[in-house]
């Protein structure tokens, strides 16, 4: 798609909106005037100041066949009038009314919270809907999420923080994965040095938390697949975490067991003995054929056995991740997946819409993306998950979106009452601070006295994490400095 910008600098949001309507044609924004190729979709956006001092906004666009044009005026030069006009023109041309309306960001619930804080719950939600043109069904979902988060968000204090610990190793690499994870065949020799340095980073983090008088409220060990580690390595890691940090106010300790092919009784026992309260066992689908399509080397039966094993060892809080839009899956297949997973008795279920980043093998190998290109069927599956999970007593409690997502939908975490994962709320909704250790981790430090959020990144790859570890420790000092700045601003 060809996008031209004249008289303004609102490129980022204009590009994002074009992608919503034309998700499979890369958006080009040429420096020099350029004609669209025959049949190519295009949009011209123009802002001109009028003699009266006001601003005139014009959008002309084509889907490659028809052309539409509209104009509006505003006393201000601002992004919103232009993007709303672009949205209306593209929606009219394509006949598409996106579920999330004009919203292209990853945190739609965070935005709803801002409206609600300003105007109250119902009026804030109405304002959100009419300003961003969000569908009634998605406004309802976002309102339910906001309500389900309330207790976890309200109990945060300025001292609260969550700890994220990254284990960037997996048994093998899934075809849809864009995460920087090393498969164990290639990375075995990195694991021990990685863990040694991770323990050092945890020590430095605990020291900083103590110096700043911070209170740990949740722990999440994710990846990758943390259960690629041996029982001894898991025991040492979890033991390190519990010995370094005070767990007096910590409400949950999650370890993402993830792939059932990495789970053994010895590993689960090590987690249980270390005080882990919540685990995740992620089927993604219960169709063996689809599992094979996406390169997961386990079967639906392995998922059932892993659940039964974890439950027999006393784990009551178990999450199951599912993905909508996988190649080879269809509506009846997804219905069956959801029914079988609910039959396993999870306390929470996360329904992801497949998002394909360019680094995923499925994209680079141009494998079967047919379902990804059938947005109606994907949307029907997501709608089914909303009805089925609601009927089974689950409430949506966190929600986020990604780019290149099947059907331009969302990922939603559902939990039985009392079983929300606080860490997911704090990190996905950016409502609480997270300090991250390990490769691929990002610390998100929320100013307790304003809506400011600062990020400190760790290196993504285990190799860099190991070879440049001194820098990782120095970045922990940045975490401390940022907290000190937050406090200084208050005084
Ligand atoms: S288990 Fe998750 S992180 Fe690991 S390869 Fe598969 S999708 Fe990627």
Image: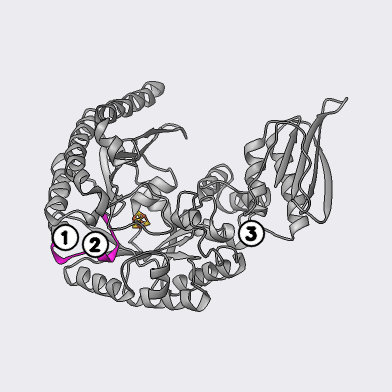
- Residue 491 seen: yes
Q: Nearer the viewer, residue 64 or 275?
A: 64
Q: Nearer the viewer, residue 309 or 314?
A: 309
Looking at the image, residue 29 lies above or below residue 170: above
Residue at 41%, 22% (x, y): give it: 489
Residue, disc 1: 267
Q: Secondary structure at mark 1?
A: helix
Question: In the displayed structure, does residue 8 sit left or right of residue 229?
Answer: right
Residues in magenta? 254-269
* CB atoms of marks 1 and 2 within 8 Å: yes
The image quadrant where one finds ligand 1 is: bottom left
Q: Nearer the viewer, residue 209 or 27?
A: 27
Q: Residues within 10 Å of mark 2 (few under 14, many from 20)?
A: some
Q: Nearer the viewer, residue 191 or 383?
A: 191
Q: Secondary structure at mark 3?
A: loop
Q: Nearer the viewer, mark 1 or mark 2?
A: 2
Q: CA distance from mark 1 to mark 2?
A: 9 Å
Residue, disc 2: 262
* CB atoms of marks 1 and 3 within 8 Å: no
Q: Residues within 10 Å of mark 1 (few under 14, many from 20)?
A: many
Quarter residue 317 falls in: bottom left
Chain-order first, disc 1 or disc 2: 2
Residue, disc 3: 135
Residue 461 in percent (x, y) is at: 33, 40
Is the shortest distance between ligand 1 and the CB of mark 1 under 8 Å? no
Q: CA distance from mark 1 to mark 3?
A: 45 Å
Chain-order first, disc 3 or disc 2: 3
Q: Secondary structure at mark 2?
A: helix
Residue 126 in percent (x, y) is at: 63, 53
């Amino acid at each position: 798609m060809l996008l031209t910008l004249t008289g303004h600098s609102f490129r980022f949001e204009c590009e994002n909106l074009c992608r919503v309507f034309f998700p499979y044609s890369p958006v080009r924004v040429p420096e020099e005037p350029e004609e669209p190729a025959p049949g190519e979709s295009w949009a011209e956006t123009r802002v001109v100041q009028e003699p009266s001092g006001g601003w005139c906004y014009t959008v002309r666009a084509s889907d490659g066949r028809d052309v539409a044009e509209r104009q509006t005026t505003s006393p201000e030069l601002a992004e919103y009038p232009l993007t709303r006009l672009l949205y209306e023109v593209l929606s009219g041309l394509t006949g598409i009314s996106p579920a999330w309306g004009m919203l292209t960001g990853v945190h739609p619930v965070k935005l709803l919270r801002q409206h609600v804080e300003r105007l109250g719950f119902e009026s804030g939600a109405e304002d959100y809907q009419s300003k961003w043109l969000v569908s009634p069904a998605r406004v309802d979902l976002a309102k339910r999420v906001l309500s389900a988060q309330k207790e976890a968000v309200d109990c945060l204090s300025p001292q609260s923080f969550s700890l994220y610990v990254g284990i960037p190793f997996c048994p093998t690499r899934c075809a849809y994965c864009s995460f920087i994870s090393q498969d164990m065949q290639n990375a075995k020799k990195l694991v021990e040095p990685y863990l040694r340095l991770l323990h050092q980073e945890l020590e430095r983090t605990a020291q900083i938390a103590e110096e700043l008088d911070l209170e740990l409220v949740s722990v999440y060990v994710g990846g990758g697949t943390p259960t690629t580690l041996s029982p001894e390595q898991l025991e040492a890691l979890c033991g390190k975490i519990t010995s370094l940090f005070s767990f007096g106010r910590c409400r949950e300790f999650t370890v993402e067991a993830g792939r059932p092919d990495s789970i053994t009784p010895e590993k689960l026992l090590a987690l249980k003995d270390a005080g882990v309260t919540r685990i995740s066992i992620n089927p993604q689908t219960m169709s063996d054929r689809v599992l094979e399509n996406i390169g997961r080397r386990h079967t639906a039966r392995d998922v059932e056995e892993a659940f039964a094993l974890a439950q027999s060892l006393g784990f009551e809080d178990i999450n199951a991740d599912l993905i909508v839009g996988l190649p080879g899956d269809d509506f009846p297949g997804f219905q069956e997946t959801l029914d079988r997973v609910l039959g396993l008795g999870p306390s929470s279920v996360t329904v992801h819409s497949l998002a394909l980043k360019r680094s995923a093998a499925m994209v680079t190998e141009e494998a079967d993306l047919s379902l990804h290109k059938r947005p109606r069927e994907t949307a029907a599956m997501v709608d089914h998950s909303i009805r089925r999970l609601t009927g089974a007593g689950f409430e949506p409690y966190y929600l986020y979106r990604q780019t290149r997502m099947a059907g331009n939908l969302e990922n939603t975490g559902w939990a039985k009452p009392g079983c929300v994962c606080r860490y997911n709320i704090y990190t996905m909704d950016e409502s609480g601070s997270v300090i991250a250790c390990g490769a691929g981790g990002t610390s998100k430090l929320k100013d307790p006295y304003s809506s400011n959020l600062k990020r400190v990144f760790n290196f993504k790859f285990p190799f860099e994490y190991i070879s440049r570890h001194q820098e990782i420790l120095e970045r922990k000092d940045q975490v401390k400095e940022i907290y000190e700045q937050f406090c200084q601003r208050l005084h």
